[in-house]
Amino acid sequence: MRILGIIVVILTGALLIYAMGDFPSWANPVSPAHNHVSPRYIEKSMEETSVPNIVTAVLADYRGYDTMFETTVIFGAGVVCFFLLRIPRKDEPTVRRYRHTLTGMTIRVKETRKIPPVLEEFERIDTLWAPHDLIIKTACRILVPFLQLFGLYVIAHGHHSPGGGFQGGVILGASMILLAISHDLRTAIGRMSERVHAILCPVGVFIYAGTGALCLLLGFNFLDYGALAGILHVDPVTARSHGILIVEIGVGLAVMATMIWIYNNISSKGRYDEGL
Amino acid sequence: MIWQLDIAILTLVVVAAVGAITIKDLLGSAILFGAYSFMMCLLWSIMGAVDVAFTEASVGAGVSTVFFVAAVFRTTRRTKD
Amino acid sequence: MSDLISSIVDNYNYLIYVTLMMIGLYAMIAKKNLVKKIVGMNIFQTAIILFYVSIGAKKDATIPIIQHGHGQGAHEITSSVIEAVEYINPLPHVLMLTAIVVSVATLGVALALAIKIYNQYETLEEDEILAQIREK
């Protein structure tokens, strides 16, 4: 298999290098990739959508179909991970282990009916428990709100600076993953439960498709944001800018929920007990 | 495009890629993959693709590396190959 | 001969991109561990994204955000002329943003499948898994 791999790689590499002999030299301003479609986007995007960031304008307005289906793909990936790995609740083991935080003694309880749900001095552990460091816990707990604020800034300021829906959504999801890594997985699920992030994911897709359907209901084309000018009482150019902001919020919600969902399922093998 | 910086980062990218698939420890492979993603992000910001570099920095060098480390933790860490 | 040397010096970027793609392809074909194959798949994907983004680069051009001062409205900006030659081509960037997000979704699904396989067969090496399947 190794020799076959080397032969295939050398053949494909030689074919690609031979095909690259015809390319224009690197970073040439008059290569054919720059001459046909993109000059229109660069020159006209400011006066048609009033969004200075050309990449955000093209992604959410001129090529809005692709972005909508990409959001659906990312939602589908979260659903697939859930279906592959999650163990149903009735199959979970009924033995619980608790640890007294002051003395380090562990107790093992078999019946689950007689235990009150929250105990002050006892923390619930797993067979793979390892002690969590106090410095890391405190530093990450202080850092998480600033991460979320930055994520919201990246989503909202995507019109004027690099950023937009995807980047802000990933940063928001990473803030919850940081909480799950530094503390327990149970702490993170206590903050944002399974039901909340499983509902937020399709809500994000629904906001995107719903904006398009709203434009359709008002008599324009699907995903033509100029239709929102009647609802928002602005001129059509500013309405396109606001429409881009609404769909970016939808994309950010969907991406955030999917990142948290996939991390929860992978790091605990579906059992949602201890995590990393 | 400063060509000295360009060659240095491209060399580092190739070294990180070769290291990520050759090393026999899967956790080291995940960390080297994170370094490879970060070098790619630097390359793209040199070329002026700031949106793509932002996305790769948050997705590749952030969340993707965490997924790899979580999966390696839940399966096995040694490999014969 | 000097023609070949000058063409290599002009296009050395493309040669390194092809090298990266071939490293990823070799890892997917020849490695036996499943996680190494997944790493190879991601190396392949990011190398292709690098190739596309480098097509959009232009000499002496700035990033694709229209230059404007702080607090300027849309009217002052559209009155000045925007030249297409001073901005980098934004179209490959748009397509590659989609590609990066799809690659992380694929990575999540691939790792979930690897964990399921490990639950069933207790190993991640391809030849041991095939031997176990043949025994049954």
Image (cartoon, coloured by chain):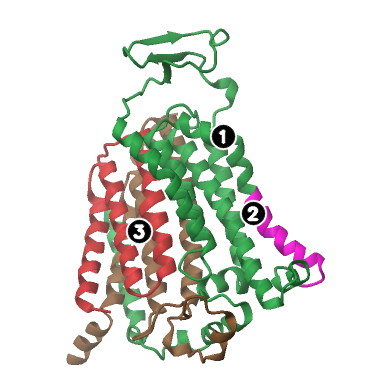
Chain colours: A green, B red, C brown
> Quick check: is A217 in the magenta stretch?
yes
Residue A236 is drawn in which quadrant?
bottom right
- Magenta region includes residue A255: no
Q: Which mark is residue A205?
A: 2
Q: Report helix, strand or loop for mark 2.
A: helix
Q: In whole angstroms, how far apart are the C-alphas of marks 1 and 3? A: 34 Å
Letter of the chain that mark 2 sits on in the rendering: A
Horizontal and vertical percent position of residue A40:
56, 86
Residue C64 placement: quadrant: bottom left
Query: Tag 3's secondary structure?
Result: helix
Residue A255 in view (yes/no): yes
Separation of marks 3 and 2 at Cα, in angstroms: 29 Å
Pick the residue in front: B47 or B36.
B47
Local secondary structure at mark 1: loop
Compared with A186, A121 (above or below) is above
The mark closer to the camera, 1 or 3, is 1
Pinpoint residue B1: horizontal percent, then vertical percent: 28, 79
Say above or below: A212 vs A100: below
Instruction: Kindly identify the amino acid type of the residue bearing the numbered disc 1.
Output: Ser
Q: Quadrant of residue C115?
A: top left
Identify residue type, mark 2. Answer: Val
Seen as rendered, the residue at the extreme left is C1
Q: Are marks 2 and 1 on the same chain?
A: yes
**Residue kind at label 3, given as amino acid type:** Ile
The residue that appears at 46% across and 84% down in the rendered structure is A33
Q: Tag 2: Cα neighbours inside 10 Å, few (<14), some, or many (≥20)?
A: many
Q: Which residues are magenta?
A: A203-220
A6 displayed left or right of A214: left
> Could you tell me if the residues under marks 3 and 2 are in contact, i.e. CB atoms within 8 Å?
no
B16 shown above or below B70: below
Disc sitting over residue C43 in the figure: 3
